Image: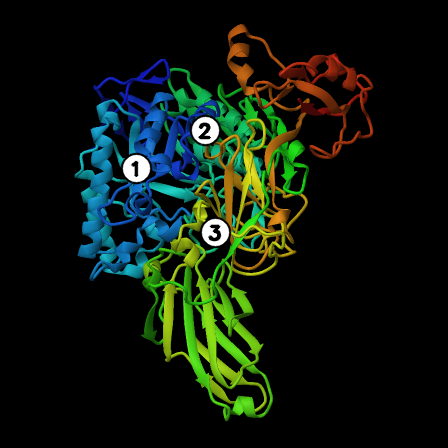
Amino acid sequence: MRGAEFAVLVLVLGVAATTAFGVNVTYDHRALVIDGKRRVLVSGSIHYPRSTPEMWPDLIQKSKDGGLDVIDTYVFWNLHEPVRNQFEFEGRKDLVKFVKLVGEAGLYAHIRIGPYVCAEWNYGGFPLWLRFVPGIEFRTDNEPFKAEMKRFTVKIVDMLKQENLYASQGGPIILSQIENEYGNMDLFYGSAAKTYINWAATMATSLDTGVPWVMCRQSDAPDPIINTCNGFYCDQFTPNSDKKPKMWTENWTGWYLSFGGAVPYRPVEDLAFAVARFYQRGGTFQNYYMYHGGTNFGRTTGGPFIATSYDYDAPLDEYGLVNQPKWGHLKDVNKAIKLCEEAMVATDPTISSLGSNLKASVYKTGSGLCAAFLANVGTQSDATVNFNGNSYHLPAWSVSILPDCKNVVLNTAKINSMTMIPRFVTQSSEDDIDSSKAFSSGWSWVNEPVGISTSNAFTKPGLLEQINTTADKSDYLWYSLSTEIKGDEPFLQDGSQTVLHVESLGHVLYTFVNGKFAASGKGNSDSALVLVEVPITLTPGRNTFDLLSLTVGLQNSGAFFEIWGAGVIGPVQLNGLKNGSSVDLSSQQWTYQIGLQGEQSGLYAGSSSVWVSKPNLPKKQPLIWYKTNFDAPAGNNPVAIDFTGMGKGEAWVNGQSIGRYWPAYIAPNGGCTNSCNYRGSYSSNKCLKNCGKPSQELYHVPRSWLQPSGNILVLFEEAGGDPTQISFATREVQSLCSRVSESHPVPVDMWNSDQKIGRKSGPTVSLECPSPNQVISSIKFASFGTPRGTCGSFSHGQCSSTRALSIVQKACIGSKSCSIGVSIGTFGDPCVGVTKSLAVEASCA
């Protein structure tokens, strides 16, 4: 059997049809085949719960405008079934609404059910109750696990079928995924791994969705499942059958942020190079992971230690705005690929060498169709190559795309798209209220009691593992011990202080002795383990030891990660400094409290009557709830809270959690560079910024969560902070920039029109204000010649046209957008014989 028969929706003028009649889709060795036609497809990941329903239409439209054909999302089991057999699909959990919006925009959907998703999501997407199913072992040939996995998968598939969302029903879903990156782990599960994967494949295909199923990073995926590639580069990937297409389900557009880490980013020149190389070497389906990363609201982060921001340096940033030049350059790359589609789907590529590290791939048919990709995979030197009798300049680590095997429409290292410099404009709580319209009242507070304070506390001998005890109902677990210290204890007799020694599996620990804070400790993304050793003073008689243990997202990956633990596992010891004496408290009768008193009483909603409002606001003290009222910042720009001055905790706006905040966790000083060389293989620690600064200071507050006035902000501060330093900020664009040389290809948008009328346009600088009601108000810099620097720091080089500034001002000021040809015909020739560039920085108002 060459492929597998499936069905897909009808497209009418690019808009998804709502007819109940599906059309056939097959796959063969080259591509997915939709309605009898092979397709080259570009996809992007948007996880519906990491944004809001109000954001979804704009995100989807910007994805379409950026050249995507497909929207990809995981399905998050613990989001939808937090309690067994109690399902939730409202608000940000409304999978059906999200998929329908994708279809209404004329795009396809890829639904990655998993139900293990990884995704830096809490517990990898598994609900915690699954841990307690008798006899269960996750992701292996285990009957209890398979029964639960099948039950949830069937639930999702049936729900989507009932809404006619599969392609076979006229809906947008053309692909589904079962399991996720299991090939990384199957060695640990022995022979049961193969049995489990075969079972998962059979179970999925038996559900009769009418669309293909894929398994990513699963080299032994059984037919008809398509095995696919995940990674920073997948050009060398080969599917496990010559009957399956070459597909890339996760092209990592950046990397995730961890609390305590620097901010990773991926240069767009490298990302574009990876995309072009994949299609050059026979790929026909590629997915940007992420296209919009979004926000880990509430307690949804995994890791542990994954930050609340899931920006991922994606083409659409955390707030839903275009991330330039990444969005624009990838838009051009996607268009350039699509100009080659007809030739690409007609045949396999013929790959040849043009020299050392120089490769040509040609898609050519007997009917005259021809498209070519020329690559310089070297990391050091540019090259000039001869291809089909013509000469082409190839920068190092770049690909040139020739839709007609003659003319270059795009080189991945040459960016035509503009750059934007974003900024956050702050409104401080200390500002004049009339002018800032931010905080409309002072702060009130409630002290969270140290130790046991609720009626559901219980006592057990010894130290309990935290996740089994809390079932992740809360980040917090109190371990409390009250014990008699006799006056003749050796470490009291010699006058020395005692050292409290506590060992924990993580992730954060606060220790209190006799009601007073003693010390704290924290793990990190490399090791969650915590060790606290602190000198303390004990008194004869009864002494209390209260240990507050915290999780910061549960493990989301690794073999057998479901049994990994957290919390104080001991030993807990009192060690004498001088005489070497020691008392082990680990096996005594400890009292436990799951969660905080404030959590149980619902303080996060802000409506309780227990709040204290007095002039002497406590600051820099642990375990305090804070509340204030505020007005929404004016305008429509995205909103964030700057938590400068705070330690660690969680924040709620109008009762909805915006996530954990932790500005006190500072990234290491080393590892960042002012500029990152895109040439050469990328890794997650290659390009870092924000070293020596808080990993995350700004936290997204969706506009749809805000009212014009009377909003309530509640914080729970664990470590100690000053809430009066908090400020609101709106995300705005400070500058637009573009730098294009005479050697750049013509803009991709001009390719078709140029071909039709037989003209040859030149390189162009284009600028456009991001908001509909904005126009270009000033030109901060313009130079045609040999300008230096980057956006925000341009300067004139050795030669510069004296006319550049006035020409650009005339063309751009007062307009929403403008385009200027980069040529000596426009600006004159300030330096004969030198390749010149036009660099412009503008602002909008």
The three-letter code of the residue at mark 2 reads Leu
Label 1 crowd bin: few (<14), some (14–19), many (20+), radius 10 Å? few
What is the CA distance from the residue labelled 2 to the residue labelled 1? 20 Å
Estimate the x, y position of residue 353 in percent, counting from the top left.
51, 35
Q: Determine the residue positioned at 59% across, 33% down.
A: 731
- Residue placed most toward the observer, 381 or 324: 324
Q: Is residue 653 above or below residue 457?
A: above
Q: Is residue 350 above or below residue 82?
A: above
List the residue tagged with mark 2: 59
- Give yes or no for contact between labels 3 and 1 (Cβ–Cβ under 8 Å): no
Q: Is residue 80 above or below residue 649?
A: above
Estimate the x, y position of residue 198 in percent, counting from the top left.
21, 48
Label 3 crowd bin: few (<14), some (14–19), many (20+), radius 10 Å? many
Q: Determine the residue positioned at 28% across, 22% down.
A: 9
List the residue tagged with mark 3: 306
What is the CA distance from the residue labelled 3 to the residue labelled 1? 25 Å
List the residue tagged with mark 1: 89
Q: Is residue 146 above or below residue 168?
A: below
- Residue placed most toward the observer, 216 or 491: 491
The three-letter code of the residue at mark 3 reads Ile
Quadrant holding the C terminus:
top right
